[in-house]
Amino acid sequence: MKITIRDVATDAGVSAKTVSRVLNNLPYVSADVRNRVWESVNKLGYTPDEAGKRLASMKSGGRVRTGNIGCVLFPSYEKYSEPYTAEILEELGKVLLEMNLHQYFCYTLEELADPSLFTRMVNPNMVDGCVLIGLSNQHQQDIIKIKNKIDCIVLVGLVNDNCVTSVHPDGVLGGYLGVKHLISLGHRRIGCVVGYSGHSDTELRLTGYKKALSEAGIEYDPKLVVGGKFSIEGAAEATKLLLKLSVPPTAIYSVSDPMAIGVYKMVQECGLRIPQDISVVGFDDIKLAAHLFPGLTTVGMDKYEMVKMAVQVLLDQIDGKSKSNMQITFPVKLVERNSCRRLE
């Protein structure tokens, strides 16, 4: 006999409506109730009616379509408080809504380390594909693990070995534009706050930094490059190290805007002023960048169009139009504000 949603509700001791809310990942259901519902779903072997309804009418290339898309984030990102990630998620929500798609789940790799959660969510019966955000070279095994369950995935970011289709901002060009701008203002001793070693954003944006220095005939000094762990606190500590150098930099390039906030914090704590005493350039053009004092000069991209491109590539995979992995580099531009000054 076919298991119904009412069977699940009876087993879990909740209403059928509550079971529906859990299955559709809707809010206003406690964690305890969600766990009970999923335990009943797994115990009874329930398959949501949604898949059955779509079986006859929503196939593409032999694939059952659910209209659901999953989202997986870099393990340490706080989903809604890390500015860049929050803005990418906001644009993803807009794009999915416009395309009549539903974001079925949004978890970090850290959360998906729970085998039960991974099995329930990263499930081809529940989602058509997944958008990965912020994952990089060190997460290749995690990406492969997801891809072994869900054929169609796209990364907003970059992994070097081409194990996944990706759409990413042009980090090399962005780093080059930001540092070239500082050099054009007369700066030659330029500090660089990077993220994690081996992370593609760090590597690409650092390559752009080095390219601009080389083009201007400025020797690369590794002492001027300090890790900021892609966090405000980490970047503040990195900035402290740069300012303690016997010959401190006159400008700092941060490979992300959230880390640039950490640069601002430490510069001000040390009694210095931006841009009078030190110039700062970031990367990402998060909304907050325009509201810092002074406004942050940074490298930006059209996040909506970048995410839209990623989702379209994902849909092409789902529809069987694209099978080979590809890397799509999205254009960036310098956004000038008031955090840089020309040296006399």
Image (tube, grey):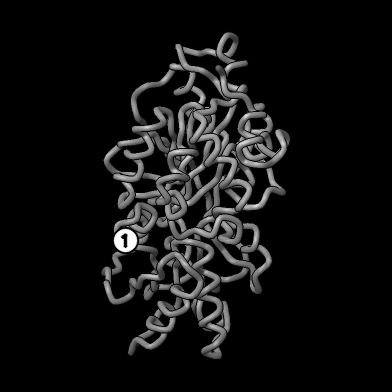
The local secondary structure at tag 1 comes to helix
Quarter assignment of residue 286: bottom right
> Looking at the picture, how far across and down is residue 296, in whole percent?
59, 66
Q: Give whichever of 274, 67 is nearer the camera.
A: 67
Inspect this view and state whether residue 139 appears: yes
In this rendering, is residue 227 above or below 25? below
Residue carrying label 1: 210
Crowd tier of the residue under label 1, counting other residues whose Cα lies within 10 Å: few below 14, some 14–19, many 20 or above: many
Q: Give the residue type that dot 1 points to.
A: Lys
> Looking at the picture, how far across and down is residue 228, in whole percent?
41, 70
> Looking at the picture, how far across and down is residue 141, in whole percent?
29, 45
Q: Quadrant of the N terminus?
A: top right
> Looking at the picture, how far across and down is residue 160, in whole percent?
29, 44
Q: Give whichever of 206, 97 is nearer the camera.
A: 97
Residue lying farthest top?
Answer: 56
Q: Give whichever of 15, 156 is nearer the camera.
A: 15
Question: What residue appears at the point 44 percent right and 43 percent down from the top-left corner?
Answer: 118
Quarter assignment of residue 106: top right
Question: What residue appears at the point 38 percent right and 51 percent down from the top-left corner?
Answer: 172
Inspect this view and state whether residue 212 appears: no
In this rendering, is residue 117 above or below 247? above
Query: Is residue 124 rendered to the left or right of residue 197?
Result: right
